[in-house]
Amino acid sequence: MGIHKTPLRYPGGKQKLAPFIREILQQNGIKGHYVEPYAGGAGVAIELLLNEDVQCIHLNDSDLGIYAFWYSILNENERFCREILVASLTVEEWKKHREVVKQPQNHSLFELGFSTFFLNRCNRSGVISAGVIGGLNQEGNYKIDARFSRNDLIRRIELIGRYKDRITVTNMDAESYINEYLPKLPANCLIYLDPPYYNKAKALYLNAYNKNDHARLAQTIQNKIRHNWVLSYDGVPQIIELYSNRRHFLYDLQYSAAKSYKGQEIFIFCDQLILPYKCSLSSINEGLERLVSFAL
C-alpha cells in the first residue's frame, strides 16, 4: 500500500494518521465521501482517495492561498507543472512570490496558488510566514532548493490531477462550511476536522484562532454536524474541557515546525461513530486500548 504524498508541507501534517482514519472508514462502512473543513495540505484526504478508500473528497480551507493552490492544480494542472519545471530557485524569485502572497488582490488565482506553493516548499518547515530555507544570504546548511524536488512534485501533482472529477475544493470559513455545506452531503460520509492548534497556532498558521473561536467551534461541531465526525487537536486542558462529554484519547505525535516537536495530541469522536478495537499505528493503538478498557 503506497503512500501518496500531498505536494504541500504542513506543520502538524496528519498524513501519518491515514491508516487510523482508513480503519474508522472501514469499521463504519463509509466508502463514499470524505470531508476536511480544514484541509491545509490534505495529506490524509489525498492518501485515502488515491488508495481508493473513498469515492470522493471535499477540501475546504479559509486561507485563500491554500484554496488557490488546490484549485490551480485541479483546473490548470499542466500549466502548474510547467511552472515547477522552469521555476527559478533564487532568493530574488522567493521575494517576488512573497509579495504575491502579501498582495493577493493584485494577482490571479493561479499566480497566488503557485506563489503559495513556492513559499510552502522553500520556507522553513513549510510555514508561509517564515523565512526562506538557508536564510536570505543562503549561508545555512540547507539551501532554498532543499525541499523543491521538481520531478517528484510534478509526479505528485499530475497524479492528483487525474482525480480532478472526484475532488471538490471550497474557500469558506470553517463554521460557515459546517453550517451551510455539510448539510448538503449524503449520509455515507466522514468529516475529519483538524483545526488550528490551541497553543502555538499564531506561529504556524496565517488563520489562527483565539480562545473564543475554539469555544464557539466546539459548540458548532457538537450541535450542528449530523454526519460521523472525528476531531484532532493539541491535547491541552482547555480543549479536553470543551469536549469533555465526548469519547477521546491522548496520543503522541511528532512533527517538525522550526524544531522537531513531540507533543500530546487528542482525538475526539462523535457519539455514533464505531471505533476500531485496534490500530496499526502503535501510539493510536495505546489510546484506543485505554478508551476501550475505560468503557468496559
Image (cartoon, rainbow, N blue to C red):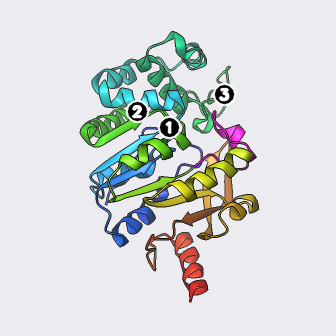
**Mark 3, residues whose alpha carbon is within 10 Å: few (<14), some, or many (≥20)?**
some
Q: Nearer the viewer, mark 3 or mark 2?
A: 2
As measured in the structure, the alpha-carbon distance from the residue carrying label 3 to the one carrying label 1 is 23 Å
- In the image, taking residue 227 as reference, residue 106 lies left or right, namely right
Q: Position of residue 160 (x, y in %)?
A: 31, 39
Q: Nearer the viewer, residue 48 or 244?
A: 244
The residue depicted at 60 percent of the width and 60 percent of the height is 253
Residue occupied by mark 1: 61
The residue depicted at 56 percent of the width and 54 percent of the height is 221
Q: Nearer the viewer, mark 3 or mark 1?
A: 1
Kind of residue sitting beneath label 1: Asp
Q: Which mark is residue 70?
A: 2
Residue occupied by mark 3: 131
Mark 1 vs 2, N-terminal side: 1
Is residue 41 something that shows in the picture? Answer: no
Give yes or no for contact between labels 3 and 1 (Cβ–Cβ under 8 Å).
no
As measured in the structure, the alpha-carbon distance from the residue carrying label 1 to the one carrying label 2 is 10 Å
Q: Position of residue 97 (x, y in %)?
A: 54, 17
Residue 92, relative to residue 180: is it above or below?
Answer: above
Give yes or no for contact between labels 1 and 2 (Cβ–Cβ under 8 Å).
yes
Q: Position of residue 77 (x, y in %)?
A: 30, 27
- In the image, taking residue 97 as reference, residue 70 lies left or right, namely left
Residue 97, relative to residue 21: is it above or below?
Answer: above
**Which residues, given as a range, are shown in magenta?**
195-211
Residue 183 highlighted magenta (yes or no): no
Give yes or no for contact between labels 3 and 2 (Cβ–Cβ under 8 Å).
no
Q: Residue furthest bottom?
A: 296
The dominant secondary structure in magenta is loop
